[in-house]
């Protein structure tokens, strides 16, 4: 299966997957999200209890929620926390992924996300916008408002924006315009751009579940590896600022 075909199928799953038990869980043992997001919690018990490190919140779709995985500890936010620990840069990972979410949905629940202080917001939104043929300008505006709204509430917060792809059946003009909005928004807002999260995962059967659409635990490890260089620089800067001199 080509990467482009896989991407289309994957995007369909991201938008159409129901909020079934386990589809969008957050917290140490997992909290189902039947329609409204649950209270954000740390992605692992160890991180939840950690007294040190930046609080990193992951806002996203079923990719972030970990649809189909054995548990939230297998999703890429928790894997990123492991990479951070290995690098001596511990962080508190909070998984706020919701299956089927869009940029507009993320913007609507931003106030809920920001009820608790955060140091870093990682935004994985847009894939479902592309599947539904959302106007790229509207998606870009939603993403800008998410970044700016976060900064208004927490001026010192850093925001990472994950680049996403639109399905190829939307036509070259649409997919190219859609792809361009992520670096545009990052440049305009000063957000850190994370390269395409599924690079090296899309279209590889061994890294995807039986549905051929959602990554396996190993696929999520690869996703974490894709995102880590961008997050590492942000977390390292946080530690440089907050470490005792």
Image: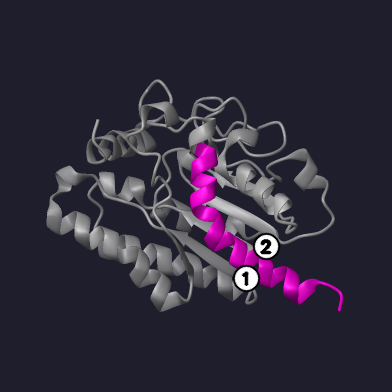
Residue at screen point 74% across, 74% down: 240
Q: Earlier in the sequence, mark 1 or mark 2?
A: 2
Residue at screen point 62% across, 77% down: 155
Q: Would you name the residue on which mark 2 appears? A: 118
Number of residues whose C-alpha sits closer than 10 Å to that of mark 2, classed few (under 14), some (14–19) or many (20 or more) = many
Element assignment for label 1 = loop
Element assignment for label 2 = loop
Quarter occupied by residue 27 = top right
48 or 111: which is nearer to us? 48
The boundaries of the magenta stretch are 220-245
218 or 51: which is nearer to us? 218
Residue 109: in sight, yes or no?
Answer: no
Overall secondary structure of the magenta section: helix
Q: Would you name the residue on which mark 1 appears? A: 157
Question: How far is disc 1 from disc 2 in space, using C-alphas?
Answer: 7 Å
Residue at screen point 82% across, 51% down: 50
Residue 88 % position (x, y): 75, 57
Relative to 9, residue 138 above or below: below
Quarter occupied by residue 236 = bottom right
Residue 127 % position (x, y): 35, 48
Q: Quadrant of the C terminus?
A: bottom right
The answer to whether 171 appears left or right of 166 in the picture is left
Q: Quadrant of the N terminus?
A: top left
């Amino acid at each position: 299966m080509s990467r482009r075909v896989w991407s289309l199928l994957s995007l369909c799953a991201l938008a159409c997957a129901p909020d079934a038990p386990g589809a969008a869980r957050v917290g140490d043992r997992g909290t189902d999200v039947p329609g409204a997001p649950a209270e954000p919690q740390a992605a692992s018990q160890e991180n939840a209890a950690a007294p040190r490190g930046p609080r990193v919140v992951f806002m996203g779709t079923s990719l972030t929620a970990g649809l189909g995985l054995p548990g939230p500890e297998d999703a890429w936010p928790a894997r990123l926390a492991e990479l951070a620990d290995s690098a001596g840069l511990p962080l508190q990972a909070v998984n706020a992924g919701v299956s089927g979410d869009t940029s507009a949905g993320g913007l609507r629940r931003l106030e809920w996300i920001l009820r608790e202080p955060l140091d870093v917001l990682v935004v994985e939104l847009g894939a479902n916008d592309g599947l539904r043929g959302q106007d790229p300008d509207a998606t870009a505006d939603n993403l800008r408002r998410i970044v700016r709204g976060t900064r208004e509430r927490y001026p010192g917060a850093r925001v990472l924006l994950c680049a996403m792809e639109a399905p190829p059946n939307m036509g070259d003009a649409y997919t190219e315009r859609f792809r361009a909005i992520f670096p545009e928004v990052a440049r305009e807002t000063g957000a850190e751009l994370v390269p395409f999260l599924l690079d090296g995962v899309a279209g590889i059967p061994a890294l995807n579940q039986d549905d051929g659409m959602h990554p396996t635990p190993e696929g999520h490890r690869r996703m974490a590896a894709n995102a880590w260089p961008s997050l590492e620089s942000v977390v390292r800067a946080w530690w440089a600022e907050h470490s005792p001199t």
